[in-house]
Amino acid sequence: MDNQGRIYIAGIRKYGFRVVPMIIRLEKNGKLDQKFNEEVEKTFESLYSQNSTTLAEIFPNSLSVDKNGKILIACDVVDSNDRINNYYSYACVFRLDSNGIIDKSFGKSGRVKIDYMDEVSSMFIDENGNIFLGGYSYSNKLEANGFIVKLKNNGDIDNSFGREGKIVLDNILKKNSNDYVTSIFVGKASKIYITGYTSENKDLFLCFPLINPFSNIFLVNSDVFVVRLNADGSVDKDFGGKLRRDLDGDGVNDTAILLDRIVGKDFRQDYGRKIFVNNNGEIYLIGESQYIIYSYAFVIKIE
């Protein structure tokens, strides 16, 4: 929702093998803003025509409107030189003016490509217009590492944050665990709160045995995590419990909150989906816990 009370909905539209973002804006009274919706459709159609040999699919995962009415869309992009054999994915942020037309003053002709992040799942714009992106990327060992990237308001990477503008989170559950960032929130004193889930890195045949596919013994455990960063991207060691593991690659053991079996002892797969922090510093987590075919939502408050 923007500061005028207008509501934005992001989705996709398919044209054959192409996947195009579809952004819909509703007025305060719920009426469709048809002119805006048509302009957005033209904008992304134009991007395809300009990149007809490479751009294949764009999946919007997060949408935010800044205080100036600029619309930012964080997407996963599937790109290919021949559209058949050489697919790879990367994170990308597009910025539109309030009328739905691409803002060419942002990044490179209206978009910022982050090719070292495979998937972007979350975006947060702070009060100064800085843009924080959360997601993950796979290493050559097929291990997922959490990523946080900070952009300036103009789309440039903020190299004062972390290491060259990014933080890589690893080993949250244990050494070589799979770590996925799903939500970011920037609170008071520019403290950055991050949630997601961390799981064991097991071979697939251990997760899905043929003898008893419903046995919970073989299911991959996953825990919810909350990590707090300082404004410069370093892990805030005054938050959470000691893990005896280095999460961000600086050679120092870090701290975090880990939550498991939130719903019950059999629900060993817990996923953090959304984080919010109020003005009193109280943290609210939304997520889900799973056990075989059962799934329950949860909301947790952390003081």
Image (cartoon, rainbow, N blue to C red):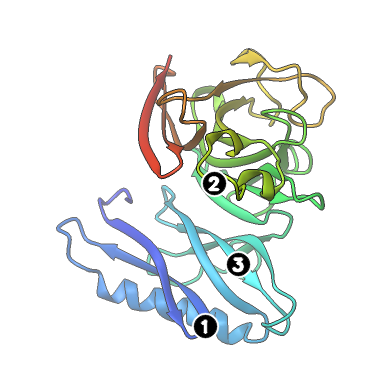
Question: Which residue is at the front of the view, 59 or 288?
Answer: 288
* 29 w.r.t. 212: above or below: below
Counting every numbered tag in the picture gives 3
- Of pointers 1 and 3, the one earlier in the residue sequence: 1
Residue position for label 2: 213
Query: Disc 3 residue type?
Result: Val
Dividing the picture into quadrants, the one containing residue 228 is top right
Instruction: Bin the neighbour count of mark 2 within 10 Å (Cα to Cα): few under 14, some 14-19, many 20 and up.
Output: some
What residue is at 58 percent from the left and 53 percent from the top? 120
- Badge 1 is on which residue? 46
On the picture, is 30 further left or further right than 48? left
Q: Residue at x 45, y 72 (%)?
A: 101
Relative side of 294 to 150, left or right: left
Q: Which mark is residue 77?
A: 3
Give SS at disc 1.
helix
Mark 2 vs 1: CB contact within 8 A: no
Q: Which of pointers 3 and 2 lies earlier in the amino acid sequence?
A: 3
Q: Nearer the viewer, mark 3 or mark 2?
A: 2
